[in-house]
Amino acid sequence: MADVAAKAGVSRALVSIVFRDQPGASEETRQRVLRVADEIGYSPDSAARLLARGRSRTLGVMFTVHQIFHTDLIAGIYPEAERLGYDVLLSAAAQGRSEAKAVEALLSHRCEALILLASDAETPYLDELAHRTAAVSVGRRATGVTGAPVDFVHSAEGKGVRQAMDHLVELGHRRIVHIDGGRGPGSAERRRAYRAAMRRHGLESEARVIPGDHTEQSGIETGRLLLDERDRGQPLPTAVLAANDRSAMGLLMALTRVGVDVPRDLSVVGYDDSHLSHLMPIGLTTVRQDAVLLAEHAVRFAVERLENPELAPREAVLEPKLVVRASSGPPPQGAA
């Protein structure tokens, strides 16, 4: 700024007035200052100018480091935010760093609105947060929030599971196991939908939910459990619906390492259709959540609430879609 002032023959205070677009400089002086700034390659701090006006035009995004699908969501958030004239700041929840701490970091950087990816925060915390700033929760149903202006964007989890289960039953499967996602995003709804589908198809006595989470390790441990049971004389299930793609990947690794043929011996279905599903040696049948559409809805909800804080709470429920690839097929003959 001092260099611009010296070359333009004005004071630094006047240069500051020009860059902040404040009154006090003639049009001739304004143009001279801007021309000199362009000549020497000086770019004023746009963030500082916005903060001086009480705006940051920044959306804060809280995500979880072990959720691969969150990277797909973030990749969709950036272009939509840029299209609407907003920047994006990320803050991660991780081991030893709570969701609340990640959120407070975003607020301390003057983010105008928050997008919470698969938040597992308790309802009172969401209520309190929504009274501090605009908040959008992605990957969570609008249940229990008591009138606070929180917006929700998620897929119809139950419908996605029904599609996967119908696919497996139509192939002839009966012994279908579900690896649970624990407290992971959408897990409770997927678990309920699995049990409901087994009842609907007359397979309630075959229903089995194996505790797990949204990591590869969960799938690996499930694979070891099923293989141990096989070695003790129990038959393998003919199909497994995993909590997500990461869990499915771990299961595939555990099974194929010891010669189990997928899908000839056992079918595996994931959930999310994250970019991970395209990197597996066996194409993964999975339920697609449209990350781009989820991200676009979240950004638009955040910006619209900033523009109109009096909007009633909203919920967008997007359609999932089963993507059939190579990891699912008919059960072994005589094993259905």
Image (cartoon, grey):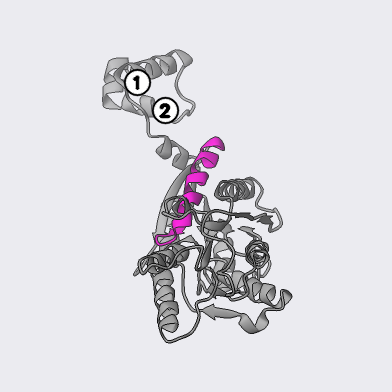
Name the residue rendered at 49%, 42% in the picture.
Answer: 78
Which residue is tagged 2? 19
Name the image quarter holding residue 316: bottom right
Identify the disc placed on residue 8: none
Q: Which residue is mark 1?
A: 37
Q: Quadrant of the N terminus?
A: top left
Q: Residue at x 30, y 21 (%)?
A: 4
Q: Is residue 83 magenta?
A: yes
- Precedes in sequence: disc 1 or disc 2: 2
Secondary structure under the numbered disc 1 in the rendered image:
helix
Main SS category, magenta section: helix
Name the kind of residue labelled 1 in the image: Ala
The quarter of the rendered structure image containing the C terminus is: bottom right
Give amino acid for label 2.
Phe
Using the image as rendered, state which of residue 221 and residue 261 is in the foreground.
261
Per the rendered image, the range of residues in magenta is 62-84
